[in-house]
Amino acid sequence: MRETSVLLGDEAVALGAIHAGLSGVYGYPGTPSTEIFEAVQNFARDSVHSVWSTNEKVGYEEALGMSYAGKRAMVTMKHVGLNVAADPFMNSAITGVNGGLVAAVADDPSMHSSQNEQDSRYFAHFAMIPCLEPGTQQEAYDMVRYAFELSEVMNVPVMLRVVTRLAHSRANVQVLKEHREQNQLDPSTDWTKWTLLPMNARKSYAKLVESQKKFLEESESTTFNTLNIVDGAETGIITSGIAANYVFENIGADQSKFSTLVIKQYPIPIEKLKVLVRNVKEIIVIEEGYPFIEERLNGLLGLDEIEVRGKLTGDLPRTGELNPDNVRAALRLGAFDVLPNSGVMAGRPPQLCKGCPHADTYNALNEAIKEFTDGRIFGDIGCYTLGALPPYRAIESCVDMGASISMANGAAHAGVRPVACAIGDSTFTHSGMTPLLDAAKANTPITVFIMDNSTVAMTGGQPTYGSGDGLRQIVEGFGIPTEHVITIDPVPKKHEENVEIIRRELAYEGLSVILAKRACIEEVKRQAKLAKKS
Amino acid sequence: MQKNILLAGVGGQGILSQAFVMCNAALEEGLNFKQAEVHGMAQRGGAVQSNLRISSEPIMSDLIPRGTCDILLSVEPLEALRYLDYLGKDGTIITSTKPFVNIPNYPEVETIWAEFEKVPHVIPVNAEILAKEAGSPLSANMVMLGAAAPFLGLKIETLENWVRNLWSAKGDKVAEVNARAFHAGREMAEFLTEVKGHGVGLKGIHFLADNLNSETKKSRSASEWADLLRSKPEAEWIEAVQVVTGAGNPT
C-alpha cells in the first residue's frame, strides 16, 4: 500500500532509507547532498542516529562501524566529498559489510556550486561495487530499499548516485505505508574479514573479484535496466539515470525510430548491450557526467562497423550538464523556435550578505597586506571563498577542503613572504587541523585566519564543532605560543585596530593564528527564530 | 493539460514559496508536477530560478526545454529578461516592475522595458504597491503568484487555499495578509489583461500598473481606461490619472 508525498530527490533518498530500516545516517554538508541528511533528521530524528561528522572520511568510517555492528547505515556526501572518503570507501569493498551500507553520493554536473564535475560512477567501478543511478524521485525512493538488500546479500557497500537536477527537484512520489524494521544489534564475529592484514586482505580481495560475476548477473536481470528493441529502428540510444528523462522528453511521442537501453544499475549489463548493438546501425550514448558508458563501449579501438556518437564525438557537450535541449540536438530532432536572448543583461553572481563578518576581515587584511610588496593569501571552501571576487579580491586560491593552510605552508617553504591563508571554522575541523599541526611543529612563517562565524554557512547553517572558546583550545593545543593566537572582532569600528594586529603578525617570521570571530548574520537570525519557537 | 512555468528572481525574494503553493495545488487537483531549483550559491543576492512543470500526463524532463515555457513569472524585471530564450511564442511574461539593484552595472530601466516590447504577452505588476496595500511588503511574491493565477490552469480556490497553508504556521493574520496579496495581484493582472484587450500597448499597461492600486483601478472600467490612455499623449497620462482618481500618487 502506498501514499503520495511531495519530495525532493534528496528527500526521496532519505525517506526510502528510513522506510528500509535505517539506523544511522552519516555525512558532511555538501551541495547537492546536504538535504539527504537533513531530511533524515527532519523525518526520523528520534529513531535514526543523525549527527553531522567532521568530514566525509570520518562519516564513512562511522557508517562502517554501524554496519560492523549489524545495523543499516547510510553515508551522504557530494562528489568531491567522496574524494575525502576514498580511503575507507575503497577498503570497505574489501572488508565487505555486516548491516547494509549505502553510500549516497550527489554529483554536480555544471559545477553549480563545486570545484569540479567529477563523475562518481568511476569510483563505484574502481571499488568494484554495484551502483544505482535513479532518474526520477520515485526511483530514488524505491532504489534505496533495494540498495540495502543488495548490500547485505552481496556483502559490499552499494553506491547510489544522484545529480543536482534530481537532488534538488521536487515531484509527487508514492511511498510505502509499511516500513521495514531496523536490524537488531549483531556485531560481526569475524576478525579476518575486518582486519586488512595482507594475509586476510588478499583472500577478501580475491572474493571481491569473484563476486563481479554475481553483480553483473544482477544487472542483467534487474528491472532497473530496460532494453527496448524496436523492429526496423536504425538508431540505438544508450542512456542512464536522469539523462533518460531528457531522451524520453524528446522521443516520447514517437519512439518508432529508436531502440533504447536504459541503464540505472551498474555494472553495465553486457548481454543487454550486445543485443542492442546487434540490432542497430548507429548508437548514441546519452549520459549525465563524464562519458563513462561511452568510453567502456568504445574500448580503446572503437566498434567495427558501427558508429558511436556521444560526448567523445562532439554530438553532446563534453562539459556541463545535459538538458532537454542539448539532448534534442544530439538526437538530430528539429529545434523549437526560440526568442533571441535579451540584448540587455547583466550578471548577478552571489555575494557576501550585507553585514557579513568576512567582509570586515577581508577589508582589514587587504589594507594590512598591501604594505608588503608581494604577499599571498590562500583561500578555502565556504562563503568566504566569495572574497576572491570584487570588491574584495582578497584570496588567490581555492582548491579543496583545507588546502588554504597546506598551500600556505608550501609557499612559505619556497620563500613567499608574507603568506596568509583564510579558512572557515568548520573547514578547519574538516581538514585544516592537520596542516596547522605541520606549521606549528616547524613554526612556519604563515598567518592563518580562521573565519569563525559559528556555523557551516554556505550549505545552509549546519552545526560546527570548532568555534569560539573550543576553537581557541584546539589551536592552542598545537603548542602555538599564545601571543601569536589572537582573537579579533571583525566589525567596522575595530578596523584600524585589526589592521595593526594583522600588519604585525604578517611581518612576524613565524606562525600566527588570527581567530576572526563573529557569528554569521544568517545564523544569528536562525538562532533567534529557534529561541522564539521555544 | 500541460504548463511549463519558469519562476525567476533574486535570492531571498521568495520564489520557492511560490513554487510550494503551485506544486501542492497541482497535486490536489490530481496533476503530475516536477519542480527543479538550485540551492547553495544562489542564495546570496544572486540570480535564482525554478523550473515548474505541471501536466495531466507523466512528466519526463525536470527542466523546461527552451522555447516551450508558457509562463515566465518573475519578481524582478531584469531576471525576467534573463530567460527570454525559454519563452514559447505564445508564452506570457508576468513580471514585477520594481528593480532590485544590488549590482554595479544594473542596466538602465528604460532599456529593460524596451526589450519587453519584443515579447507579445507581458503583464507588468507593481508588487510593491499591492503588497503594502495587503499589509506587508514581504507579501510581494504572493502578489506576483496571484498575478500569474489566471494563466496557470489551476483553480483559484486551490491556489488560495495553499497560500494560506504556506503561512499557517505564522498564524491567521499572516495567512490573511498573504491571501489578500494573492487576490490583489490576481485582480490587477485580470484588469490589465482586459485593458490590453482594448488595444493598449505595453507602455500603457506598465504605466497603469505603476500608478494604480486595487481601489483606484476601479474608478473606471477597463475600456474607459483604455480610451483615456489612447486619447492622450504619454506625457499627460499622470495628470489624467490624478484627475480620474481624484488623488495624488497612490504609492
Image (cartoon, coloured by chain):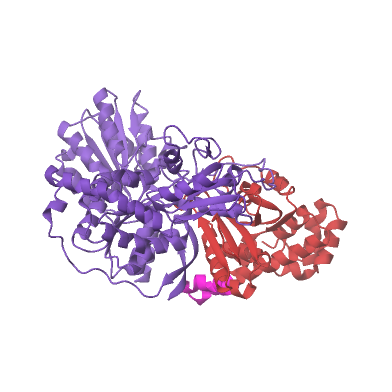
Chain colours: A purple, B red
Q: Quadrant of residue B130?
A: bottom right
Q: Which of the image's four quarters has the N terminus of chain A?
A: bottom left
In the picture shown, does residue B38 fall above or below B156? above
In the picture shown, does residue B143 fall above or below A317? below
Magenta stretch bounds: B160-179
State whether the magenta stretch is mostly helix, strand or loop: helix
**Where's residue B98, x and y in %?**
63, 54
Nearer-the-camera pick, A279 or A506: A279
Residue at point 51%, 77% (across, down): B172
Nearer-the-camera pick, A284 or B128: A284
Residue A489 shows in this picture: no
Residue A200 shows in this picture: yes
**Where's residue B180, x and y in %?**
61, 72
- Does A428 sit left or right of B19 as displayed? left
User: Which residue ends up furthest to the right in the rendered image?
Assistant: B231
Q: Quadrant of residue B202?
A: bottom right
**Where's residue A214, x and y in %?**
31, 53
Residue at point 58%, 42% (across, down): A330
Residue at point 52%, 65% (across, down): B20
Q: Which of the image's four quarters has the C terminus of chain A?
A: bottom left
- Does A270 sit left or right of B80 as displayed? left
User: Does the magenta segment cover residue B184?
Assistant: no
- Does A208 sit left or right of A161 as displayed? left
Nearer-the-camera pick, A323 or A495: A323
Image mark count: 0
User: Does the magenta segment cover residue B165?
Assistant: yes
In the picture shown, does residue A372 fall above or below A225? above
**Where's residue B145, x and y in %?**
61, 64
